Image (cartoon, coloured by chain):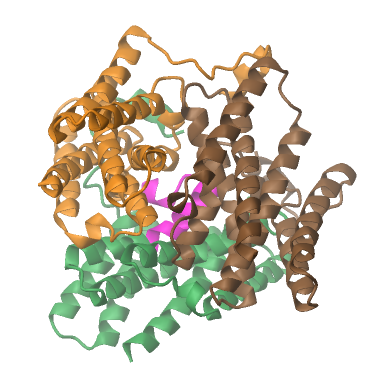
Chain colours: A brown, B orange, C green
Amino acid sequence: MTSEYFIVLGIIGVAFFAISGALLGHEKNINGFGIVVVGVMTALGGGTLRDLLLGKPIFWVDSSEYLLATYSAIFVTVLFIRYFPSPSNFYFILIDTVGLAIFNVIGIEKALISGTGMIVALTMGMTTGIFGGLMRDVVCREVPYVMRGDVYASACFAGGLTYAALFALDIPYIWCILGSIGVTVLLRIASLHWGVNVDLFRKRTPRQQKKESSTE
Amino acid sequence: MTSEYFIVLGIIGVAFFAISGALLGHEKNINGFGIVVVGVMTALGGGTLRDLLLGKPIFWVDSSEYLLATYSAIFVTVLFIRYFPSPSNFYFILIDTVGLAIFNVIGIEKALISGTGMIVALTMGMTTGIFGGLMRDVVCREVPYVMRGDVYASACFAGGLTYAALFALDIPYIWCILGSIGVTVLLRIASLHWGVNVDLFRKRTPRQQKKESSTE
Amino acid sequence: MTSEYFIVLGIIGVAFFAISGALLGHEKNINGFGIVVVGVMTALGGGTLRDLLLGKPIFWVDSSEYLLATYSAIFVTVLFIRYFPSPSNFYFILIDTVGLAIFNVIGIEKALISGTGMIVALTMGMTTGIFGGLMRDVVCREVPYVMRGDVYASACFAGGLTYAALFALDIPYIWCILGSIGVTVLLRIASLHWGVNVDLFRKRTPRQQKKESSTE
């Protein structure tokens, strides 16, 4: 039963990330098949790293549904963008966040099943969630979202803690998943709309002029 | 017999990519051993990722011929550049494309031998071909070739389809390989010389001013 | 006994790289948990790649001490920076170099234990030492240290050769390690302070004007 959730969730997450990759590739005016490359990389990057780290067979090599979902999502996105005006940045971030939240949960769960401790599992969840988008941003020469001021890794981490807490309280499995995804998505959206910011590690040293130039 | 083709092809491909890495490193004015690092990364990156994904032992860890070929190619390139004027961009692209075409075929073949389906195999071929050059471009802070306007991933994909078609028609093995490599190289060179462009996914939305700045 | 050295050395190296990642992340004005992501990536990147390449279980998935050391080092660094003025660039480079030297030795040793030849082992050492810092620099959008003019990969390689030479001379194990680390650190620091430079591969072609713009 667990593994069925995995497959459905995984396919949804892969499709969301593929869309986000295709959207950013389009934004960056990448032609030809380059946009497919960005989409595939975003969709499969995080999960691939997770499976490599856990020593499991790579999920998309094992069964080709994930690749089909990825290619379909990219194709539909490209068609959509051709005939409709480009979606606003808010939708891009929403799609990116849902992918992040889903992969975070899958990463944690897969790590726990492999028998790792909770600290390794939380790290694995963040790795799975963040890595695909990070590759997308690096290859597209964007400042990675993880590195910007807004809540990103923190939302992911909070989602992971939610999962761990609900799991420890013996809540039914499906609610652990939905709770974790909900917390991640809400935190990130809230942070963008109401400017709620986690500034635990904000730079405080009085080098304002340096600060301005180095974040350019 | 198959595996002999592999080794020879693999060594040729590795050497071509090593040269392309050393050339770009030199172009970027990288001194010391940094140029060796770029060359090694370009030469071994794609095949390493392929072997990781397929769960096989890494090719250059298994037998050191690949490393010797890589280091020799870098060394010869560096010597050549010291005493002769720097080669034109055309040769750089030709060398890069031959490496791409060869690794594409090897990736497809290795995936098929591992028992994957054709869609996974084609993805694996593109991964193997593209990833080394992508790392080279990211580390050298170039816009990756995959992301530029010209035919790159499309040529790679066309080469893969050629291989699959010839393979399905029971053409002798050596012709599958040569046909696929030929299609990839010809498409890319043709696209550069006559401006043949695959614009399936060209951006059409009327945001010209944004477009100019975002591709900078 | 060997494996005890490994664990202690590994934890020290991981902590040093985590600090260097947190420092650069702070320098780049990354808020929230982004700084944790950079630190973790720097600390674990090189060793993770090494274990993947050698087909071993990933060191930080196996035992969570490494993760604890990483998180602690990042946390202490962040606290330190909040209340004290930011350390000078010299300390950053010193910390980075010690991490490089330690991971270089561990990479060589782990490869040799896996039964690879010396040329593969030296490459593996450089991979282990360089890759974490390279990811840090790419994600923070810095010119990677490997790509700059100063001695970096050369110092790493010299440390590897020292290790190989001492090993061949049957010197006690601990001196092989210390000798290799010492050579790497001294070479890099010396190169920075007295401008000693390894210019084996310096660009000589008379394209000065191109050179200026391409290194921008």
Looking at this view, name the residue that lies furthest to the top.
B194
**Would you place residue B102 above or below residue A86 in this image?**
below
Q: Quadrant of residue A79?
A: top right
Relative to residue B150, is residue C35 drawn left or right? right
Q: Judge whether residue C136 is colored magenta.
A: yes
For residue B147, above or below residue B141: above
In the image, farthest residue toward the right? A194
**Residue toward you, C100 or C203:** C100
Residue at x 47% of width, y 64% of height: A53
Is residue A203 in view?
Answer: no
| Left-right relation of A205 to C137 | right
- The picture places residue B6, in percent across and down from the top left corner, at 17, 45
User: What percent of the width, then of the height, locates residue C4?
Assistant: 39, 88
> Observer-nearest residue: C179 or C139?
C139
Q: Tell me what residue is drawn at x 63 percent, y 30 percent.
A: A23
Does residue C173 show up magenta in the picture? no
Q: Could you tell whether B76 is left or right of B197 in the image?
A: left
Identify whether B25 is placed above or below A85. Answer: below
Residue B179 quadrant: top left
Magenta residues span: C129-149
Q: Residue at x 70, y 54 (%)?
A: A101
* Residue A45, percent from left and from top: 52, 49
